[in-house]
Image (cartoon, grey):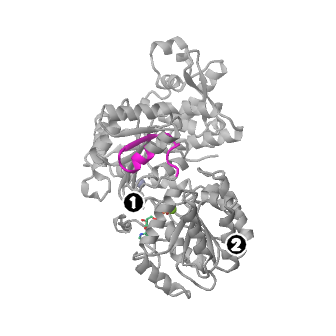
Amino acid sequence: DPKPSTLSVLPQNYEKPARKIIELKHSWSRDVAKALHQVFKMSEFRPKQLEAIDETLAGKDVFVLMPTGGGKSLCYQLPAIIQNGKTRGVTVVISPLLALMQDQVNHLVEWGIPAMAVTGDLNASQRNFAFEELSTREPRLRLLYVTPEMLSKSDKMREVIDSLYNRKLLARFVVDEAHCVSQWGHDFRPDYVLIGNYKRQYPGIPFMALTATANKRVQVDIMANLHIKGCLTLSSSFNRPNLFYSVRKKGADPISEIFSIIDARYSGKCGIIYCRSKANCEKVADELQLKYNIKAAYYHAGLAKEDRRRIQTDWQNGKVQVIVATIAFGMGIDKPDVRFVIHFTFPDSIESYYQETGRAGRDGLPSTCVLFYNYKEKKTFVKFIQEGDGSKVHKDMLLENLERVIQFCENTNDCRRKLVLSYFGENFNSNLCHKNCDNCLGRENKVFSDVDYSEVSIKIIKMARSIICSGRKVTMLQIVDLIKGSKAKKVQQSGDMSHEYFGCGKDLKKDDVIKLLRLLVNKKVLSEQTESNFRRVLVSYLILGPNSTKVENGFMKISIRLSNTKPKQLPITASSGNLNAPQSISRDKTNSNTKYIESNHSNENISVNGGS
Ligand code: ADP
Ligand code: MG
Ligand code: ZN
């Protein structure tokens, strides 16, 4: 049973192709349209597919950037069956994963397209069959899939390709999952780098490189390594319209919350839970299994290779429902029906967040991504980064990535899609989110006003400075007490009650003071220094950050976005058209109700205005 077209199930906001398919621009246009309908049985192109096909059929190099599930394969599978004067013969597809290759070959054969994967797994006679076919005068084979290792290690393979080239039967090289070429990518493969040599070795043969990485640095690296700098780059939106993004405060019992998510909407459906430590993986999996009777298994680098392979297969076949994994899991997973991706702890960068959540909903059906966020966990990661190997520059980069994730989590106002995509330089119009993220969904019931908190911030800076200058250390929670003007015994003992700014924020809610302090850290007005105390517990102390004087001198304004929950507004109804409405409604209802009971003037969000 071939995969159903996912286009019909994609929500309305899925970008429609910009042009009609039968626009007979080129000598091959009619054949291309025919192939789309009659061979691939698809009704229209998705954005950029036709552009990519036209470019390669014109004999030029092209770089294709599309999100996972965007339809990259068609960009080279379709031109492979179009034979024209410039590019005829066999398309060589270099792909890193045997499973993906075999899957594609099966589809192609179903469509009636001669294709083969030549891998180390084939026995000698199977391999010879392929080589013989390729040596015939007019090979019927249209697509030859190979691993980069096969290309670099098999002399016979190179001989066959040389011969195709000499006989003008080598149509193009396709480098799928091209981020494997870059050391900055998440699954670097040394043999991929050698592919760059083919550009020189086989002059005139067009290259097509494809990847779902949204990282600019990796993109530049790919073009350089493959020697295709300056070629046409086609990039479609990295928005994944069918994913619902949300961030939740990690409460006392996140595992029971995870169970509720699964139980309410995804009972029996597959999902991934990402943890940062092996111990957490085991704990979460065990508890889901023992307490909640969910078929969960853990997966981390501490397991033997066979165990990992078995668990992955069990999950892929649906024998295991939920996999609880460290980031070691995920490379090249091509499971289309992952319904939820949960981050038990925050990811290490926005890029990782995008990649990890991106494993959900590859089939285009509604799927959910929940990130459990706890600011207090930050210090563990800071410590981990600081004690790791690598240069200072590298560590600073990791710390910066972490700060961005925190900023993302703390933001309860802006569209999550807009935030994520903006890290990749994409200017996403948040109206196209269609309430498919927690912030857009929640916005209905809120009215916002920006309030300037610069004055309080200046007092906080001065208070922090005088404490630090007196040679003492102060934690965030201690300074919260001072800002609030707490009369607690420990505060009285500290002697800070006599400070002129003691109680400078006594009218603010404690939560809001904490948010303000986190914003100040995020904006480098304050900094946190993490140390082990005498009981070997990690503690973060506040110090002044490089931007503190900018705030004091009035060059940088600090403003917080206050939201008032509109009192009489009812929660959004199921007819709002939101893909994940039922789950979101129940969550939203509880949230807005509790907020309303506590206060109808709750601070919801922090944003900063101004800069240097
Ligand atoms: P990617 O490699 O970019 O992750 P794939 O090439 O595997 O994505 O395509 C994802 C799914 O989209 C596949 O099921 C494919 O058949 C389908 N698809 C691709 N292009 C189209 C199209 N123009 N119309 C309908 N379905 C398409
Ligand atoms: Mg692909
Ligand atoms: Zn949104």
Q: Is mark 2 within 8 Å of ligand 2?
A: no
Residue 113 picture location, percent across and down: 47, 75
Badge 1 density bin: few <14, some 14–19, many ≥20, Cα 10 Å: many
Count of numbered circles in the view: 2
Q: Is residue 133 left or right of residue 509?
A: right
In what element is the residue under mark 1? loop
Taking the magenta stretch, the answer to whether it contains residue 93 is: no
From the viewer's side, name the closer residue of 574 and 208.
208
From the viewer's side, name the closer residue of 509 and 554.
509
**For residue 120, which quarter of the picture?**
bottom right
The N terminus is located in which quarter? bottom left
Q: Which residues are magenta?
A: 311-331
The residue shown at (60%, 74%) is: 134
Q: Is mark 1 within 8 Å of ligand 1?
A: yes
Q: Amino acid at mark 2?
A: Asp
The residue shown at (63%, 53%) is: 189
Residue 229 picture location, percent across and down: 70, 67
Q: Which residue is mark 2?
A: 162
C-alpha span from label 1 to label 2: 38 Å
Q: Is residue 409 left or right of residue 96?
A: left
Badge 2 density bin: few <14, some 14–19, many ≥20, Cα 10 Å: some
**For residue 558, which quarter of the picture?**
top right
- Could you say which disc has been placed on residue 355 in the image? none
The residue shown at (34%, 65%) is: 9
In what element is the residue under mark 2? helix
- Residue 190, relative to residue 300: is it above or below? below
Q: Amino acid at mark 1?
A: Asp
Residue 561 picture location, percent across and down: 45, 44
Between label 1 and label 2, give the one nearer the viewer: 2
Q: Which residue is mark 1?
A: 363
Residue 382 picture location, percent across and down: 59, 33
